[in-house]
């Protein structure tokens, strides 16, 4: 890789724009030839330390490891001493002596940082409350496959502008020279630091970010309209309030009728059908959602291969 590969991937901004592009290129190659990289890491192992439920992230990481000749240990919090008082740092230090990489799905982003600080192997953020970089890789790949190029595309993110998916995809689009419009109601605005980081990247890439409370305005020039679940996994007590606050931000045929004809709908899944996205859109011809989900596998494979082979070169 010509770009600088980071030790860990905790947030999208850990990778420079060139490395991001090269990860997508490698993922495309791996999609064409899934077992073509089976030998480099044969006999290795990754850990999937998961403190929250997961379908796509866990299954794609485990399958990616398998396709790279490695095994994957799924380590749920309650089955680990981590769930019974051992620190994240001590867990990371010990797991580093068995594993070639540690993937972590957790609540507080500081936990994945604690893993990375103590681990001597690459750590991958498999979702924290503020970042979801693995999802963004798959999303970029789906957009690039569909539109042919990323620079200059406009994405409208409609709904909760504070979500981890929004934060990470904003950074990914910023690095790729895209225009990002966030339509969120008051009280759901994206963090100023996240916006500031994106704007800095956009000075180099030529992208832009803009904010509105109006979903129709947001989608009016968008090639992609991104919906995200309204109630995060650990916020079920906010279900009623969020459903009320975000009711005008559903991605459905009515909203897409205000977007350009080529606009595609995106969602990271799992979806609450009929809430943040309609079934007609999710299952319809303008859905990029299933391609995003499928792309979790080759992008996970590219990420693991890149981080682990780079780490091995650095430590030998
Ligand atoms: N999109 C995503 O991260 O899905 P899972 O929660 O099923 O892993």
Image (cartoon, rainbow, N blue to C red):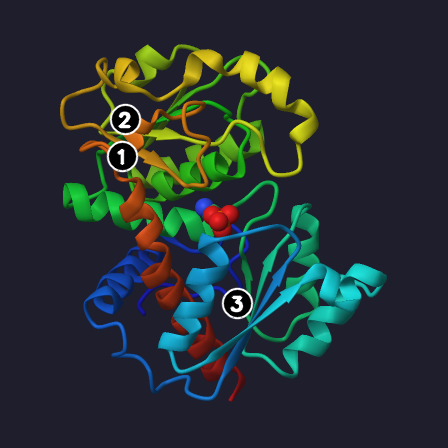
Q: Nearer the viewer, residue 9 or 193?
A: 9
Query: Local crowd at mark 3 within 10 Å, few (<14), some, or many (≥20)?
Result: many
Tag shown at residue 307: none
Q: Which residue was labeled with disc 2?
A: 280
Q: Which residue was labeled with disc 1?
A: 283
Return the x and y of residue 108 as percentages of the image width and height: 69, 46
Q: Residue at x 74, y 70 (%)?
A: 91
Return the x and y of residue 186 as percentages of the image width and height: 55, 12
Q: Which residue was labeled with disc 3?
A: 7
Q: Residue at x 31, y 67 (%)?
A: 2
Compute the Cα span from label 1 to label 3: 38 Å
Q: Which residue is drawn at 42% across and 78% down?
A: 309
Quadrant of residue 245 within the rendered picture: top right
The label nearer to you, 2 versus 3, is 2
Give the mark count. 3
Q: Is mark 1 on a helix, strand or loop?
A: loop
Quadrant of residue 61 within the rendered picture: bottom left
Asked if one can make out residue 48 in the rendered structure from this viewpoint, the answer is yes
Asked if one can make out residue 212 in the rendered structure from this viewpoint, the answer is no
Compute the Cα span from label 2 to label 3: 42 Å
- State whether residue 43 is above or below residue 3: below
Q: Is residue 87 left or right of residue 196?
A: right
What quarter of the picture does the N terminus occupy? bottom left
């Amino acid at each position: 890789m010509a770009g600088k590969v980071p030790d860990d991937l905790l947030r999208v901004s850990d990778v420079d724009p060139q490395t991001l592009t090269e990860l997508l290129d490698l993922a495309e190659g791996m999609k064409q030839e899934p077992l073509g990289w089976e030998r480099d890491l044969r006999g290795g192992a990754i850990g999937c330390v998961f403190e929250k439920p997961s379908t796509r992230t866990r299954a794609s990481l485990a399958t990616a490891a398998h396709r790279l000749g490695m095994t994957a240990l799924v380590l749920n919090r309650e089955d680990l001493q981590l769930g019974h008082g051992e620190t994240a740092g001590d867990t990371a230090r010990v797991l580093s002596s068995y594993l070639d990489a540690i993937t972590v799905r957790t609540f507080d982003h500081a936990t994945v940082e604690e893993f990375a600080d103590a681990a001597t192997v690459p750590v991958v953020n498999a979702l924290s409350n503020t970042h979801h970089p693995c999802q963004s890789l798959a999303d970029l790949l789906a957009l690039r496959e569909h539109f042919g190029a990323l620079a200059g595309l406009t994405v409208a993110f409609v709904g909760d502008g504070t979500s981890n998916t929004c934060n990470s995809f904003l950074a990914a689009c910023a690095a790729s020279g895209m225009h990002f419009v966030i339509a969120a109601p008051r009280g759901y605005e994206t963090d100023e630091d996240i916006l500031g980081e994106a704007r800095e990247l956009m000075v180099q890439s030529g992208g832009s970010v803009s904010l509105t409370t109006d979903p129709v305005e947001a989608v009016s020039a968008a090639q992609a309209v991104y919906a995200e679940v309204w109630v995060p996994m650990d916020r079920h007590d906010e279900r009623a309030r969020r459903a009320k606050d975000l009711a005008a931000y559903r991605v459905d045929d009515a909203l897409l009728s205000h977007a350009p004809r080529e606009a595609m709908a995106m969602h990271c899944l799992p979806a609450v059908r009929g809430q943040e996205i309609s079934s007609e859109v999710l299952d319809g011809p303008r859905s990029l959602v299933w391609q995003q989900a499928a792309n979790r596998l080759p992008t996970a494979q590219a990420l693991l291969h890149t981080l682990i082979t780079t780490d091995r070169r650095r430590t030998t």
